[in-house]
Image: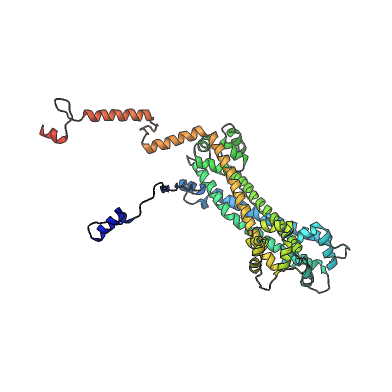
Amino acid sequence: RALRDMLAAYRRGELELTPEDLKPPQPKGAPRRKRVKDAPVVVQKESLASRLAAKSRTMDTNDSVIKRRLKAKRERDAQEQADLLAKDFRANCAKIFDLIDEDGSGTLSLPEIMLALKGKPDVLRFIKTCRNPVLSEFLVPPRVQAAMKECDTNSDGELDRDEWKALSDRSLEAILERHALARGNDDEFIDEFLDMAVIVYDLIDEDMNGTLSKEELVKACGEDEDVIEFVVKCPLPELQDLLNPELLDKALSEMDTDDDGSISKDEWTEAVGSSLTKLLDERQKDRDADNEFAIDFQTKAREVFEMIDADDSWTLDKEELMAGINQKRVSRFLISCGNEHLQYLCVPARLGPMLWELDTSKDGIISLDEWDSAIAIALDKKLEQRAAARSRDKKVAADQRLAEAFDMNADSLEAVRDRKLAELEGRIDEDGNIISQEEMDRRAEEAELARLKAIPRNAWGMPLSNRSSLLC
């Protein structure tokens, strides 16, 4: 009744309603809308290289003697590695040839090659890892004849040593190209590391006399957090010991090869170069582990293909896939492979659409090439996951080592932080000493009392304003 009366008054123009009045009231007991708190602002800490570059007193690190010497050493080491890799590969090729050549005739027949692939693991592994697409065709029975015909350049039905050498040279080119690519990936890492090494040396050398004294090392490795973090990144024990006050003398004696009581640029270059070599060895070890994983993954993928291929046609149709996914080994591999098109093959309702996605030629079956393309996508995803997990584990380990280094030098670091805070707050006297907070409070109190005493007062001791003082 009240609502009807209000509406009638509104229609007659006797009542004015705002848009807020026309909104329906909130029912009793309705939950209040929670206020969404602002997301905390995450301040991204700059990288160590950026922080060191901001502190640098050197305009161009490329002109540094340290960087030039280390880069020259790196070039020599890389060339030696490439030469050693080529020498070892050629020796391995000759060994594989002799393993396949059962009758010692100096030529390889097709039956000898196929027998060696089945009964000699070294030969099988060589064919898988040689990165020669022609030799890889010997692993696919329907393509063996075509592969033999392509390798046999003189068409005598067998492979002689010259033809085998030509195949191995093509493989070596692919391997050296991959080695050069890995070296190119390391170049950016090397440049950044060498720039940091040059800047750190410059930061430690406060008097800029070209050598690092014990006092300079003690101060920098105990008070500069960025220097400490760089030393933690170096896996060389001599550099790591600089952070431990108890082992500092021992570390200095090991680095000071000429026993002059200081670290010269040559001695610093030697220590940093050894650290860089260890870091590059770790990166190469990670790449080798990824290569081993890739070979194992591709081998399992080929075995799963053969398990699904019931009629040995080296193609997969829908019926074979439906029967194959019932095998535990097949379904386990498909689910964990990392390619969603292969994963959904295990879901009967999605098998048809996934078969359409995998069948790029749209002929209704999955050929070996189409299967290998899907496996390559899955392998790339697996390698990305491995790299992310490895990077995460290394970061956790590095953070733990850094925390331990900070704990060892907690007193000196705390003193440095106190001085920086005092500088910001203006608590540094004329002699450069830090004024304590109690002294600052006492001085502030004295200044306030002096200010109050300077205010003019009347006969009753009440403070007067400037206007009242002028009037008086």
Q: How many marks?
A: 0
Q: Which is nearer the eye, 184 or 283?
A: 283
On-image quarter of the C terminus: top left
Is residue 368 toward the left or the right of residue 240 in the image?
A: right
Can residue 161 be seen in the rendering of this structure? yes
Q: Nearer the viewer, residue 87 or 419?
A: 419
Is the residue 275 above or below the residue 78 in the image?
A: above
From this viewpoint, is residue 268 visible? Answer: no
Q: Is residue 16 above or below residue 352?
A: above
Q: How is the image coloured?
A: rainbow
The extreme front residue here reads 1
In this view, the residue farthest toward the left is 471
The single residue placed furthest to the top in the displayed view is 460
Quadrant location of the N terminus in the rendered image: bottom left
Coordinates of residue 320 in the picture (x, y in percent): 74, 66
Q: Is residue 160 left or right of residue 377?
A: right
- Identify the residue shown where x is 78% and y is 72%: 149
Residue 239 coordinates in the image, percent (x, y)? 59, 40
Residue 224: image x %, image y %? 49, 39
54 displayed left or right of 460: right
| Depth order, front residue of 361/461 | 361
Quarter-wise, where is residue 8 in the image?
Answer: bottom left
Residue 400 location (% of width, % of height) = 57, 40
In the rendered view, tell whether residue 199 sits above or below residue 292. above
Classify residue 83 by image quadrant. bottom right
Q: Nearer the viewer, residue 274 or 303?
A: 303
Left or right relative to 272: residue 472:
left
Q: Residue at x 17, y 34 (%)?
A: 465
